[in-house]
Structures are given as structure tokens and as C-alpha cells.
Image: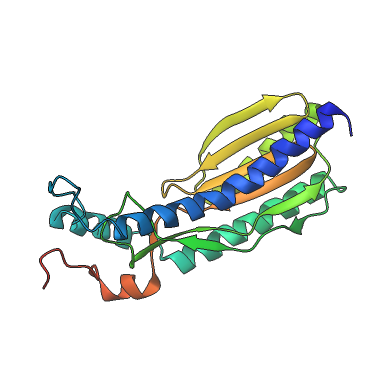
Amino acid sequence: MTPARHRTLETTMNRLIRATLAGLIAAALVLELAGCGGDDRTGSPMSATPDPSRLAKQFADLVQRPDIDQATARYEAMSGQIRDALSRVYPDLRWRQTSQLTGAACGFGYPGLETDGEQRGLANWMAPGSIPDGRWDEAVQVVRTVALKYGFDKVVTTVSRPEDHEVVFSDLYDAELNFGSAVNTTLLVRTGCHLTAEAKKRGHPAFSPSGS
């Protein structure tokens, strides 16, 4: 294997690893908070207890979103349509699933909603082979056309090198759609924070700062 191909292979693998690690890191941070005990060694209180008004507002905001199962189904449908659209334009792409769906609590941004909220990393998809540099913009437009229908109206170019490209789309729920091409072509989706179906039906946080 040439040095150039080794670098691009390493880049592709790093993309796949990043998507999986994002959910695992969020879960680890939540576990770390749970084990803190609420005080530091000097006896000064730590902000382990969420502010009641902030908790209520965050829950109310999340109630306006689809629940995590609905969001997952919607994003999975989008991912499938994108793969189909790309395969029509680039018939040599043969997609295969390279990981399973993963889930984690929403993390530091939503203290007190650890049992009510969830974010997920959808199954990762990869197609052996790359999209030629001269057709990369065309491929991004194919993805954008589908992604816009699902509210992914923001896009950032994160990698732009010869034979190595990556863009990240996002929506108003902080979900991310990662599309890249180096040695292989990859498609990754991570949701933002959504309430579980049970929490949304309940209509209020499971955690009560007042203890009631």
C-alpha cells in the first residue's frame, strides 16, 4: 500500500470511529457526573442538581421535538434515500452497513434529563471506493437535495483535499449528517437530543429537583 493510500484509509477509519465515539463519550460523561457525589474535596457544593426552571424549560423545548424513536425512523428514511440517490448517479457504489445503532443519554447539556432524553448514532454505511474529485461537488448536491427535504439546511466543509473530502449537514435539532469520500465513501448520521416516547407522553421530567 502506498503512503497516500495508507493516509486516506486512516482518514476514512477515523470518520467511522468518530461517529461511534461521540455517543460513547456522552454516556461516559453522564456516568462520571453520577459518581461525583455532589461535593468536591474542599466541601464546596458542585452544581450536580439541575436548576428547576432550566429543567422545566429544556423539557418543554424537547416536547416540541419528535420523540427519539420518531426521529430515528425519520433519519433512517433520509439515509436510505440518500444512498439510493447516490447509487443512481454512481452505480459502482455498493453500500453496506458497518455498525449498529447506538444510544446514550443527552449529556452535560441536559442535566436532570438523563432518563428522559436520548441521542443516537444511526448505523454507519460505507461503500468501497471513492467519488472522483471532479464529481465531488455533484455528489454533495445529490446529498443536499435529499437532506434539505428533512430540514438539514446547514452544511460545513470539514475536509477538502485531493482524493479526500468530507461535509457535515445539520438541522435545527442539532442532528448531523456526515458524508465523506476517500478510499471509501461513508454516510453517518447522529441525532440531537430527543425525549423518549414514554417521557414525552408523561409530559414532565422524571427528575424533580425539589424531591417531590
As drawn, the residue found furthest toward the front would be 41
Residue at 21% x, 57% y is 55
Task: Residue 35 in the image: state x and y as whole percent.
Answer: 31, 59
Task: Residue 156 in the image: state x and y as whole percent.
Answer: 55, 32
Task: Residue 26 in the image: state x and y as whole percent.
Answer: 43, 52
Residue at 70% x, 36% y is 11
- Total labels: the figure holds 0
Question: In the figure, is residue 159 to the left or right of 148?
Answer: right
**Quarter-wise, where is residue 30 in the image?**
bottom left
Quadrant in which the C terminus appears: bottom left
Question: In the figure, is residue 194 to the left or right of 207?
Answer: right
Task: Residue 59 in the image: state x and y as whole percent.
Answer: 26, 60
Compared to 96, does 132 lie above or below?
above
Quadrant in which the N terminus appears: top right
**Quarter-wise, where is residue 9 in the image?**
top right
Give the colouring mode of the picture: rainbow
Question: In the figure, is residue 30 to the left or right of 18?
Answer: left
Residues 34 and 117: in front is 34
Residues 22 and 62: in front is 22
Question: In the figure, is residue 44 to the left or right of 81?
Answer: left
Residue at 57% x, 38% y is 168
